[in-house]
Image (tube, rainbow, N blue to C red):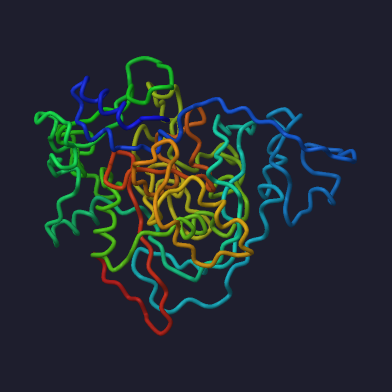
Amino acid sequence: MANFVNHMRNLVLKHHIKIALIAVVFVLQACQGHQDKTTTNAKVSQKIVIKRTFLTKEILFPRSAASFCRPTDLPRSDSAIFMNGGGREFKETIINTSAPVTGVPSGMKYIPGGEFSMGGVNPVGMNGGGHEQMNDARPVHRVKLNPYYIDATAVTNKEFAAFVKATGYVTVAEQKPTRAEFPDAPEENLVAGSVVFTPPKQKVALNDYTQWWSYVKGADWRHPQGPKSNIIGKDNYPVVQVCWEDATAYAKWAGKCLPTEAEWEFAARGGLSGKLYAWGNELRPKGKWMANIFEGSFPNKDVGTDGYVGLAPVKKFPANGYGLYDMAGNVWEWCNDWYRADYYATVANNKVTVNPAGPANAYDPDEPGVKKKVQRGGSFLCTDQYCTRYMVGTRGKGDYRSASNHIGFRCVMDVKPGNSNKLAAN
């Protein structure tokens, strides 16, 4: 949107919110509930007889590629038929067969790597699909990865506290913003703090996210919702209020790094191909909640039918096929890659892209001047009323020096032949 950053500067100053909100490009910006309209020009030359539980024309809907995700004339209740495998764009995942080296690092899982179809389909029209077409998640393309290790959970408060104790590290949210960074801000607005989800008291239109986000002086990883909050007794909760720079500093100290976007998605899929979620195609298989997301009336009332209102501890929902927890919902997770909305198009013509590290620079057409990194997985604020980016192939984005109380991270480590990769618990 034109001149967005300048507009936000004026808005923030007017309401006496710290000017840092200008730079905070929340994932939820990407999740604004615009009602996208989809059309299809597809013409099917032969009649396809569809029953609720199977497809009778195997030639048009082969098992290897599953079926289309374009239920043009089907009721929403039938759309699950077309979710299996994600459509023709998705091909079988080919898992590497090499055995892992000995000594998987403590708290991590071995990911064999292999070749898979990366990206996501347009979910609009599906049950729980939401309003977004997720155009930045396409074209679906083939990617090949070497084996690696990944943290079984998001980094916790306990783990991050050990890093801070050992290094004396001060997060970006704990630092006073500088005049050089925000030359137009009044001095009284240059105060340390971060952005916190603050639900309104009543239902509001979903076209202005400043109605539920507030800059809070003194909000940081120890005080995720402001100076009156704390993390006492929450050692096993994901650390939040950490920006990409903070996450990278932790990873370096731990002898790890942040995952590439491709590594994150391959791990999240758990060996499955083309599924909507890290566990399959149903949001709630047999009525069971598989992730911590938002239920109720967004943004004013989370009723917590999944068991949690707001953030949940790690390992409270089932692990995926690789033994990884919370690859959907709970907290967004930083990836190492710069975000470009058009990046997938730049690699789509490759037969296979090997170990992609993302684009050389960031570019979001909505905010061309903001340096954004990729975020993945969605958070406890995601809902089909506003943001469905807990779907495994979808993408998020955020300013690399901005934090909030719904963003965390996990780390990866290369598998080196002949190296046990033993890691002391921190």
Q: Can you tell which quarter of the image residue 219 is in?
A: top left
The image position of residue 95, as x and y in percent, is: 59, 68
Q: Can you tell which quarter of the image residue 365 is in?
A: top left
Q: Residue furthest right?
A: 46
Q: Is residue 269 left or right of residue 222?
A: right
Q: Residue furthest left?
A: 187
Residue at (39, 49) in percent of width and height? 362
Image quadrant in which the C terminus is located: bottom left
Residue at (36, 51) in percent of width and height? 334
Q: Is residue 275 left or right of residue 249?
A: right
Check the image and report above or below for 206 versus 67: above
Of 243 and 228, nearer the camera is 243
The image position of residue 283, as x and y in percent, is: 56, 39
Of 362 and 397, nearer the camera is 362
Of 136 and 379, nearer the camera is 136
The image position of residue 214, as x and y in percent, is: 26, 27
Check the image and report above or below for 254 versus 287: below
The image position of residue 135, as x and y in percent, is: 56, 40
